[in-house]
């Protein structure tokens, strides 16, 4: 499978600096290193490969002088120094909003929302896809692809269109029609597969193994793709004035995002860009798909896969690849992993909308709801500076709240009718 | 009606610098000036009032040192110097994307898309609402309100929630349920009115006249509200490297946005922030609501109101308040006003999505479609630098394209089934 991208695109065929300051791919389990290329599993132990770097000195000033998107951190990503010149969606540098209303409601003194719903296709996936696109380009891929039911499909189809690369997106054929439109608008090559998401995923891996020149963002270029999530951590630190928060709450699907935000904080410390200080990382899941939360609470190291049953579809990964690393990080930093019911997810969506004017999708409702539960159960210190990440946008999961909200009154078009409402 | 905001909030009750460098409200028709306050019609001739300023010297460096949102231009807006300290949605500074794919398709050498779909509630309305919110606050308003069917309702409800001010949004009761949810998620006070949009609008004016302390963003604080659209012009110039484009294409609903972008360009020239140079302004309408385009083509000064019949609902204003000023500007600059059919609007949406990865709503489809028509009819010079504005997001008008796009194939979950598709 790791040879899916054309054979001419092995490390020796790469142009100088194709992956910036990245040095190799290193196994997260056994530390074995392989050359940069379309590989994602360790040839020694089958552990996940992750990008390793030789970082030069990087200054805050150099970063601040960069573009107002994720490429300001290009020195810390596996991308070439001229990455801004290649057509991409220019994601990132989204709002970090002081959330005093939400903080007051939850009893938290100093709360921020990192709002990734204002990315080009309205989720954090634009960040990771931009890094995957760069890798695909440098590896000489001719097709940019993914299996997905939602945010990832939108991000891949949009980025592929802008890059002018052939893009193929695989979805389960029973996906709701509006979500199909959401990706089909960007690409001619939307392929509906009769089966569930696992079937679609397996087909993607099969195609990656059979076809040459295909870059599946979350399969054979996954190590590069995943690095994109670090930019969430970089931005939070920079937007706080080059400082790490005391506590951060992050949704957990595969767990990749949480591990990469932690990696970002560690890299900033190593590079001297922020002061070294303790911070606690918290993971958020929906109870209907909470294998990591269950393992955390049980105090065990192994994640027991589950069959997802929750409205938080974008978090519904029953066998999360990075779950064990999430456990490590949350335990190491003194954080926690917590989960809430679907009703609490819906309440979380409304809470964020009505306090801060941010309409989040179910994943964000999960994160805000878990934040609330963490305070109520004494797991999170309300006196410490806290950041909560909103990863996506409510218009994509409108059904979650459509039964809950609506007009307060329906009136005739006259002042008297309005006055009678008491509003 | 102009006394709808509490009487204590007249100019004499204002705090020093409540409206920044704004000096007065000046009539666009007769130049009569009135004090800054909740007024929108000239007491002499009933012409529209517009904010007039005493600008200090403003440098590019001061602006560049400001926040990454519209408040970087606060010296040029009717807002106090501490505006960033008041909770708001922090809109603006959205992407200006080089659109080489779209340019190639249309035969335009040097094309940019200003993408306002990545604003907090996914349309340019967040800009104007942020300025209206500041005016409401400074005038001592206790209720923040609007009549709207879509983008404006979202922006007002979200900004009001974040500001912690009571917010009331009026919609026609027959509005599709998803669009109701879209605003109801932010506010408890969504009021459905049995009637069409004109009925809702009339009711809003009636309430503004009867109630004290209400700020209706597009009624009694409209002069302040409208100034927010200037930030689109400021950003385009700054993002081009402090340079005006040669040609710009802007959608026309009331016409306010187009006139304000022109005002922004003129102010930048007056302040010496950009070089004075000729530029052409083009207006875009849908044929089903094209009173300004009709007047332009007929060579007349008067706008004949129409009953809108188009899928471009956010442009469907049959009697556009600023239509005559749009005619003035497009004629003065050598531009034009053009219109396209609903089918061409749908094609415009797909064209932008498939070339640049931007999913726009019907208003953006109109603008892109008109751009295409302007080139084809020789009204726009394809050799000159051109900017097209995308004002909103496709998820809000999904129906417009849902019959047009979908899966290219539906297959069994096997490689052989995929290979047989020929994709």
Image (cartoon, coloured by chain):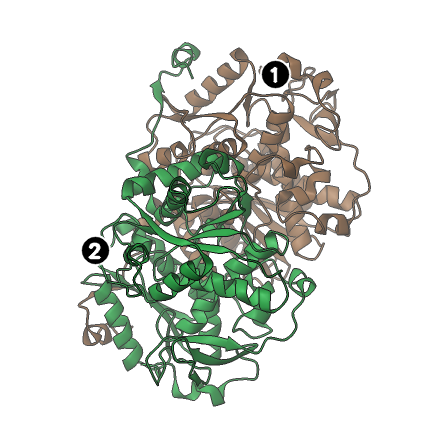
Chain colours: A brown, B green
Chain letter of mark 1 equals A
Q: Residue A2 carries which label?
A: 1
Is residue A275 shown above or below A228?
below
The residue at the point 30 percent across, 33 percent down is B404
Q: What element carries label 1?
A: loop
Image location of residue A134, percent across then percent down? 62, 31
The residue at the point 73 percent across, 39 percent down is A75
Looking at the image, which is closer to me, A7 or A336?
Answer: A7
Image location of residue A150, percent across then percent down? 43, 35
Q: Which mark is residue B174?
A: 2
Is residue B53 shown above or below A184?
below
Q: Looking at the rendering, in which quadrant would you find the N terminus of chain A? A: top right
Is residue A156 shown above or below A378?
above
Image quadrant of residue B257?
bottom left
Chain letter of mark 2 equals B
Q: Is mark 2 on a helix, strand or loop?
A: loop
The residue at the point 53 percent across, 73 percent down is B79
């Amino acid at each position: 499978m790791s040879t899916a991208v054309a054979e001419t695109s092995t490390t020796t065929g790469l142009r100088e600096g194709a992956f910036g300051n990245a040095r190799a791919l290193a196994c997260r389990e056994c530390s074995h290193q392989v050359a940069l290329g379309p590989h994602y599993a360790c040839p020694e132990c089958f552990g996940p490969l992750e990008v390793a770097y030789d970082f030069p000195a990087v200054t805050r000033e150099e970063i601040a002088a960069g573009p107002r998107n994720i490429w300001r951190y290009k020195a810390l990503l596996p991308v070439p120094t001229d990455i801004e010149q290649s057509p991409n969606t220019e994601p990132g540098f989204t709002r970090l909003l002081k959330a005093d209303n939400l903080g007051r409601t939850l009893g938290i003194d100093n709360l921020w929302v990192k709002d990734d719903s204002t990315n080009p296709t309205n989720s954090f996936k634009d960040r990771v896809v931009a890094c995957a696109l760069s890798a695909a380009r440098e590896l000489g891929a001719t097709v940019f692809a993914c299996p997905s039911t939602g945010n990832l499909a939108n991000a891949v189809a949009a980025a592929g269109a802008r890059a002018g690369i052939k893009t193929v997106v695989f979805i389960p054929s029973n996906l709701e029609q509006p979500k199909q439109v959401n990706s089909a608008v960007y690409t001619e090559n939307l392929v509906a597969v009769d089966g569930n998401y696992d079937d679609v995923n397996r087909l993607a891996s099969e195609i990656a193994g059979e076809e040459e020149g295909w870059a599946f963002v979350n399969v054979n270029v996954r190590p590069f793709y995943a690095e994109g999530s670090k930019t969430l951590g970089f931005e939070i630190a920079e937007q706080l004035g080059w400082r790490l928060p005391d506590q951060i709450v992050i949704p957990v699907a595969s767990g990749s995002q949480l591990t990469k935000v932690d990696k970002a904080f560690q890299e900033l410390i190593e590079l001297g860009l922020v002061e070294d200080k303790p911070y606690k990382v918290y993971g958020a899941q929906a109870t209907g798909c909470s294998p990591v939360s269950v393992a955390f609470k049980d105090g065990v190291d192994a994640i027991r896969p589950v069959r997802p049953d929750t409205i938080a579809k974008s978090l519904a990964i029953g066998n999360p690849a990075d779950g064990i690393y999430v456990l490590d990080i949350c335990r190491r930093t003194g954080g926690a992993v917590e989960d809430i019911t679907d009703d609490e997810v819906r309440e979380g969506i409304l809470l964020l909308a009505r306090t801060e004017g941010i309409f989040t999708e179910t994943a964000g409702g999960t994160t805000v709801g878990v934040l609330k539960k963490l305070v109520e159960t004494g797991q999170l210190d309300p006196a410490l500076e806290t950041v909560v990440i909103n990863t996506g946008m409510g218009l994509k999961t409108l059904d979650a709240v459509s039964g809950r909200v609506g007009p307060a009154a329906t009136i005739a078009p006259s002042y008297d009718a309005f006055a009678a409402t008491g509003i």
